[in-house]
Image: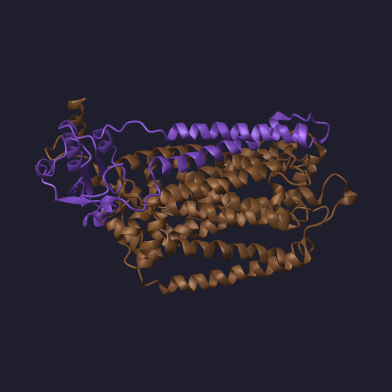
Amino acid sequence: MATKTPLQDPMIDPRTGEYAVIAPGHNFKSVTQKIAGIVLTSNTPLGWFGGLTVAGGVATLLLVALTWLFLKGVGIWGVTIPGAWGFAIINFVWWIGIGHAGTLISAILLLFKQTWRNSINRFAEAMTIFAVVCAGLFPLIHVGRPWVSYWLFPYPNTMNVWPQFRSPLAWDVFAVSTYATISVVFWYVGMIPDFGTLRDRATMPLAKYFYGLLSLGWRGSTRHWIRYETASLLLAGLSTPLVLSVHTVISFDFAVAAMAGWHTTIFPPYFVAGAVYSGFAMVLTLAIPIRKFYHLEDLITLRHLDNMAKVMLATGSIVGYGYCMEVFMSWYSASHWEFFMMWNRMFGPMGWAYWVLILTNLAIPLTTLWSRKLRVNVLYLFILSFIVNTGMWFERFVIVVTSLYRDYLPSSWGTYRATKWDYMTFVGTWGLFTFLFLLFVRFLPMIPMSEIRMMLPQTKVRPPGGSDAETVIEETV
Amino acid sequence: MPPREGIYGLLAEFNTPGELVHATELAHRAGYRRMECYTPYPVEEAAVALRFHKNRVPLVCLLGGVLGVTTAFLMETWIAVWSYPLNIAGRPLFSWPAFIIPAYEWTILFAGLSAAFGMVALNGLPQLYHPVFNAPNFRTGATTDKFFLCLEAADPRFSPGETRAFLEQFKPVSVVEVEH
């Protein structure tokens, strides 16, 4: 993009000076063909197979690590006293935070009528679901006896034992399971009309059959569309408080505990902002290679990348405010323990992790994202998305580990060292995430066709006479 | 139940949403009531022309939400106070502020599931067979780039010849008879 001066760029709308959300020249048929073609083609790109193999290989690490874990127990991990919470909770919070951007894009931006979101909302939702899959894995394997993890749910049993609802860990079960369910439902409901399109355009009998079943017989009837739009809006309205509550509840896992560095009221908003921050970084990590690989630059334009970078700038600033307040409150509280925790966090044996976090989460992104040139520099954003997600992972590492390993009583101090099984499990979830995502881009419509059609200029209703349709209708009323 | 044999209706195909809305509006004025538009994306003006203003999805969603919050809160209260009372740091058995959080989550869970499944059920889906799929041009266009108006034979105003002539005046791409 650097080679073009902005005004000569055909992607720039001359009226607003912004990049267009959809490249000019598209019509209903061309967007449908482009998106459906990715799924319905019989020539799967070789690169896809390559990616699937690599991701599958990495996911195998997870399988191996989990098998060993189930054979030996959580003792193979680095968790011990005093660091009783290690990688499992760090990864859980990190992954679920990544998922939050998907819901933000699909729900909150829908309510704010940000139509540019239409191109990216489907795969951001898919990202949410796969991130929740990876996140949900950690509490389940962390319980020690994963084969009885259904005990977490309230169900009538012969032991007559029930969950304890005053514990944030029980709230977590409700928040995360609701989040997973509603995300899947929202995702599926959004895809029903597109399954109808795929059913009608498929040539292979098997594809016709499966997309036909998945479409539930969708035929685009106007009465159906109106109910569908109502349901989408309601789901968006419900997902918005849901997504805010999920990371709030997760922050309660920490904030309710009487540990220095955890017991703060700033945790809920700052966790939610951090979640959205890392989630948008992950959307960029996924969107940038996908638009290149499938030549979707017409539909996922620089406008999208620019806007996402702006959201990251805003949420990153909130996170930065959170860090400042943590430091300030540890001084202002006049609590010896809080003060020591912050000193230990910055200059203790694991102080390097704090400075990595400050560098990758604040220093690099919050200084550079102000520049529009960098916000539309695809390569820079791609690299930055990894930097930010590294930073967000270290944020959770710092929160979990630094508060635990040196708590109130110096005689109980210890340290935390992750084992190779910890690393294998974590790296394995990247493989699982990528594997699921690659399956998604191959078999499901990754951009919502019906919503893209609504963004085209041809949707303007003009009767054959030339006057506006609404005047035709108003005459009769 | 409409008759399962013979003509289901006449299906007119248009290239633009404007033509569709115009035709629908005039069909309504001409007294047709049993009719439906089929479009590749939601066309709100078509719903206005069909006089389809209200739907019951919000009501179903509300009922689901109320059911969710009641279920969760009563379940928690019953478990914590009667079925399995535990002394947790001396807090009261009926610790209602703590119970709000799972109840909040279940409000959203039940309301969301009701909105989604309610929408599917009110739409009469899943319905894998429908007569309009028999029209040769329906599946190539209705979910891609064409706009359809179907005047159904069940309408008392319907007569094959007259209705066809009525639709032809809007210069559609085609008017097709749809069989059951």
Chain whose colour in the figure is brown = A
* Residue A271, quarter of picture: top right
Q: Which residue reaches farthest right?
A: A411
Q: Nearer the viewer, residue A74 or A363?
A: A74
- Residue A226 position, x and y percent, is 35, 39
Q: Is residue B96 left or right of residue A412?
A: left
Q: Nearer the viewer, residue A168 or B159?
A: B159
* Residue A333, quarter of picture: top right
Residue A312 visible in this rendered orientation of the protein: no
Q: Colour of chain B?
A: purple
Quadrant containing the N terminus of chain A in the rendered view: bottom left
Residue A52 visible in this rendered orientation of the protein: yes
- Residue A467 position, x and y percent, is 15, 34
- Residue A134 position, x and y percent, is 60, 57
Count the labels in the image: 0
Q: Nearer the viewer, residue A359 or A42?
A: A42
Give the colour scheme of this rendering: by chain
Quadrant containing the C terminus of chain A in the rendered view: top left
Q: Is residue A417 left or right of residue B3?
A: right
- Residue A385 position, x and y percent, is 52, 56
In the rendered image, the vertical position of residue A67 relative to residue A136, given as above or below: below
- Name the residue: 55% across, 51% down: A99
- Name the residue: 14% across, 51% down: B174
- Name the residue: 78% across, 56% down: A349
Q: Is residue B66 left or right of residue A251?
A: left
Q: Which residue reaches farthest top?
A: A477
Q: Is residue B139 left or right of residue A468?
A: right
